[in-house]
Amino acid sequence: MKTVVLAIVTGFVVGFIFALFKLPIPAPPALAGIAGIVGIYLGFKAFMAIQPWIESVLK
């Protein structure tokens, strides 16, 4: 939980600084960004789930 809180605080600070200096946000549009993050997470979890099978096939 500590990691999640630190990630949120860090993201907030970075977003605030970018807005302060009137720079474009360093992320894709909200929904597309969230969808991309979810996709990356699901792909990672899928690989971890099938990794033992892949290793057994390659032996």
Image (cartoon, rainbow, N blue to C red):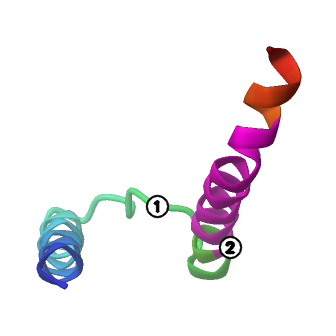
* Residue pointed to by mark 1: 27
In the rendered image, the quadrant that contains the C terminus is top right
Q: As rendered, which of 48 and 6 lies closer to the eye?
A: 48
Q: As rendered, which of 6 and 53 lies closer to the eye?
A: 53
Q: Which mark is residue 45?
A: none
Q: On screen, 51 above or below 30? A: above
- Amino acid type, residue under disc 2 in the picture: Ala
Report, in whole angstroms, how far the alpha carbon at label 2 lies from the one at label 1.
Answer: 12 Å
Rendering coords of residue 38 (x, y %):
63, 71
Q: Residues within 10 Å of mark 1 (few under 14, many from 20)?
A: few
Q: Quadrant of residue 3?
A: bottom left
Residue lying at 65% horizontally and 63% vertically, measured from the top left: 36
* Residue pointed to by mark 2: 35
Task: Determine whether, in the image, residue 9 is placed left or right of residue 26.
Answer: left
- Amino acid type, residue under disc 1 in the picture: Ala
Residue lying at 65% horizontally and 81% vertically, measured from the top left: 31
Q: Quadrant of residue 12?
A: bottom left
Task: Report the span colored magenta.
Answer: 35-53
Task: Determine whether, in the image, residue 12 is placed left or right of residue 34.
Answer: left
Rendering coords of residue 49 (x, y %):
70, 56
Magenta-drawn stretch, dominant element (helix, strand or loop):
helix
Q: As rendered, which of 48 and 23 lies closer to the eye?
A: 48
